[in-house]
Amino acid sequence: MQNLKLPITISPSRSAQRRLVCEGVFKLSDMTRLLATCEERSEHVQVNVKFDVDERGLTVMSGSASALVALTCQRCNELFDHKLEVEFTFSPAKNAEAAEKIPSYYDVVELNEDGEVNLRELVEEEFILMIPLIPRHDIEDCSADADSVWGELPEELEKPNPFDALKQLK
């Protein structure tokens, strides 16, 4: 399969009228916001987007994307490979008023002043949302001592209450 470079911006309405299907790649190195939270392991992001018009006459963009990145494990501080895979379904809107009319089963994406959507930014934002809140290896793959318990204090003798002295003053 040949890796075709996808357009960065695209008109969803014109593409939906032609029932366009786009399969290709974006360079992962161009996704700077994503790379601020992880490191790249693959050169390209595989993207598949289908443009269509639904039964209500709304323009719909649906598709999937995948990329391999490296995240820092929060247990052992070492890098590990993580495959980001997203599926999305969007309906474009010109403004906030038009966005309110779109059904809740579609995510809304705003069009720019030229009536286009930045496809690369859209995929990048979906990837950012898929990064785990606390990235970690699987327990068996992690070099950190996974049996350690955090936050437990050793049992000590019962300490006197510091407010007992106030009781005596009463």
Image: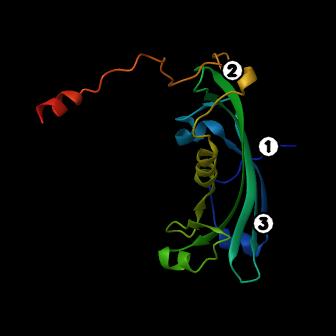
Give the x, y percent position of residue 169.
Answer: 11, 32
Sequence order check: which comes first, mark 1 or mark 2? 1
Q: Quadrant of residue 163?
A: top left
Residue under the image location 68 percent in, 25 percent down: 80
Residue under the image location 57 percent in, 27 percent down: 74
Sequence order check: which comes first, mark 2 or mark 3? 3
Give the x, y percent position of residue 117.
Answer: 59, 62
Which residue does the numbered mark 1 point to in the structure image?
3
Q: Secondary structure at mark 3?
A: loop
Q: Is residue 24 left or right of residue 103?
A: right
Question: Which of 52 and 10 lies nearest the eye of the viewer?
Answer: 52
Is residue 41 placed above or below 93 in the rendered structure? above
Q: Is residue 62 left or right of residue 71?
A: right
Q: Is residue 42 visible?
A: no
Considering every residue shown, the one lying at the far bottom of the view is: 56
Q: Few, some or many C-alpha atoms within 10 Å of disc 2 (few <14, some 14-19, many ≥20)?
A: some
Q: Is residue 169 left or right of residue 87?
A: left
Q: Few, some or many C-alpha atoms within 10 Å of disc 3 (few <14, some 14-19, many ≥20)?
A: some
Which residue does the numbered mark 2 point to in the structure image?
142
